[in-house]
Image (tube, rainbow, N blue to C red):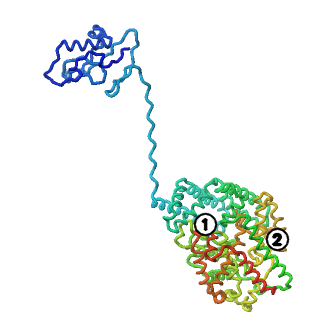
Amino acid sequence: MPKHTDEAQLNIPAFLLNPIRNEDYEPAEEEVDAVMESVRQAAGISPTQADVPEEGNEPEQTDEDPTVTVDDQSGSQAEDCAPAVDEQSQPEPEPAATPKSESEPEPTPEPEPTPESEPESEPQPEPKPEPEPEPMPEPEPSLEEDLDHLQAVERRLYAHRYASAELESFGATIDPKKATDDRAEALAVLMEEDHELLSKPEVGTMLERLGNKSSELDDTVAAQVRILTRDRNRLVNVPVADQAKLVRLASQSYDAWLAAKANDDWRSFAPYIDRMVNLQRRIARAKNPDADPYDTLLDEYEQGTNRAFYNAFFARVKRCVLPLLTSISKSGRTLSASCVAGRFDVNRQWELAHDIARLEGIDEDAHFLTSTEHPFSEAMTSNYAITAAHVERDDLMSNVYTMLHEVGHNLYEQGVNPDFNHTSLKGGTSMGMHEAQSRFFENYIGKDRAFIGPLLELMKQRFRGQLSRVTPNQLYLAVNRVAPTPIRVNADELTYPLHILVRYEIEQLLFDGKATAREIPKLWEERYRKYIGISPANNVEGPLQDVHWAQGDFGYFPTYALGGAYAAQFRAKMIDEGLAWDELLATGNLAPIRAWLRERVWEYGRSKDPAQIMQDACGEPLNPRHYANYLTKKYAAIYGIR
């Protein structure tokens, strides 16, 4: 195959290498012939081949300038000159055929070389495509954009939280039986959407960026970032299917508990407990693979706690309570509750429930009172709180102290900074701190000698015929007598933490795999006999009395006893600071006490952890000494113990 040659091998006159475009100039015929001869020789073409074209392959006619030029440093072949022709009068020219040798196959046409590169004789491989440039990284969102993103996430979570709280409250109060599965499905969908939202990588990176800029954030936003990050970390590693399954199971288990309690049928309910324990254990391991599952649950209800913490706490409680119970038993003094015995009209009891809520200081325009099987409280925002009570015709005081307890929860919720309503900071900081508020109003106010006067007057307004002869001292001794009972919610202050200890010990056995639900009634009876000295008559008085396990609330119970210790410390601090405790309670004026709690505890919502609240409010961390001192002083005085 003929090779292209460079200009040094061609005998080309200089006037052709650097032509001057001049229409009046014509090269001499001898010069043109010499150039063409040189080209033919270089290409290996005989004169015959060059002069006589093959049949059907006439030379190509072009409409270019007839002057022949050769580009500098191009090495391309020159073309024959041809006279100019009229473009409009000529047909479309046929492409000229390339001469071919008889001994070689017809070559593949080669691309015409460019002036910048000298063509090679051998065909070159296809050049590799140049890699696409890496996309430019997107600019990091501005602080303002991250803050907008944060609030958008918060608003969606708030809407789901509001809807879930209403659905759960309706399920325990007004929903018909057949609504169980539908409610469970709705709650599961809301949980799945929460999980999906918080698990998005862009939410995690947004929270991380804001966390790194905490010095540029105000206190509220910085707390939102911290709390929402913690909520996300607790959720992101849990399979969404398990979270949804837990929500569905809790709804179904609640209805199974209702039926079992109505029929004293532990056997029908036990499988739900086993399923709930197994599922909660699996979820806890997903949240923190390196921690004991039960420790993980304890920490969720009360940040910073675990078995070691509660073991030490209950050991301290037992050192106080058990000797006191022994001393009371030896004192020989027996107190009576006959002054409040009898049957009390249910409708008037509900009227009394409203009276008690007003006395405590609830905002009635933001409060809804209803009935349920097991009392509870719930709050969607500081503007909407639900108290659900259970009235017993033959137990007036159960309703009275249920209301004091549950309204105490909702005073906390109504006292949270309203700016937190649509954020993750809404609500109480922990269940221990929540129980501190409820037990504060139930026991430290409701069973205080000074407050008994206003409380009794309220009761007499609804039941004057039955209570007209009851004195404040009689009522005080009736509600503070130590009388072991199998029912936790009716327990006296002194034995109450022992009821909690029973449940705490059984929960540990379940999560350690040392017991199953079938064994719970036996374990329950053994521990009630050991700590309180009685045995339940049936399972309704035993493990079926509480709803917590049906809802999967393992790790919750210990916070009741812890809340009692928190509340004792708050009371001690108020008195130490000069609050006129007795005078305020004797007049039923609880406003200064509510103000103290609002400023030290309530308004912070979840923005402060319980340990920080205790330190800031009381000037010291949790100190069970205040709890022990309160119990010892009170019951020694009542029973004449030295």
* Quarter of the N terminus within the rendering: top left
> In the depicted view, which residue is nearer to us: 104 or 262?
104
* Quarter of the C terminus within the rendering: bottom right
Quick check: 81 above or below 284? above
The answer, for residue 404, to whether it is visible in the render is no
Left of 353 or right of it: where is 65? left
Q: Secondary structure at mark 2?
A: helix
Residue 550 position by quadrant: bottom right
Res 528 label: 2
Residue 309 position by quadrant: bottom right
Q: Residue furthest top?
A: 48
Callout in the foreground (1, 2)? 2
Residue 468 position by quadrant: bottom right
| Disc 2 crowd, CA 10 A, few/some/many (<14, 14-19, 20+) | many
The reply to whether dot 1 and dot 2 touch (C-beta < 8 Å) is no
Res 508 label: none
> In the depicted view, which residue is nearer to us: 424 or 230?
230
**Residue 336: percent from left, percent from top:** 80, 85
> In the depicted view, which residue is nearer to us: 370 or 25?
25
The answer, for residue 627, to whether it is visible in the render is yes
Indicate which disc, 1 or 2, sits on the residue closer to the N terminus. Answer: 1
| Disc 1 crowd, CA 10 A, few/some/many (<14, 14-19, 20+) | some
**Residue 418: percent from left, percent from top:** 53, 73
> In the depicted view, which residue is nearer to us: 182 or 540?
540
**Residue 414: percent from left, percent from top:** 58, 75
What residue is pinned by disc 1? 165
Of the residues shown, which amino acid type is indicated by label 2? Answer: Tyr
Left of 615 or right of it: where is 14? left
Q: Secondary structure at mark 1?
A: helix
Of the residues shown, which amino acid type is indicated by label 1? Answer: Ala
**Residue 601: percent from left, percent from top:** 60, 75
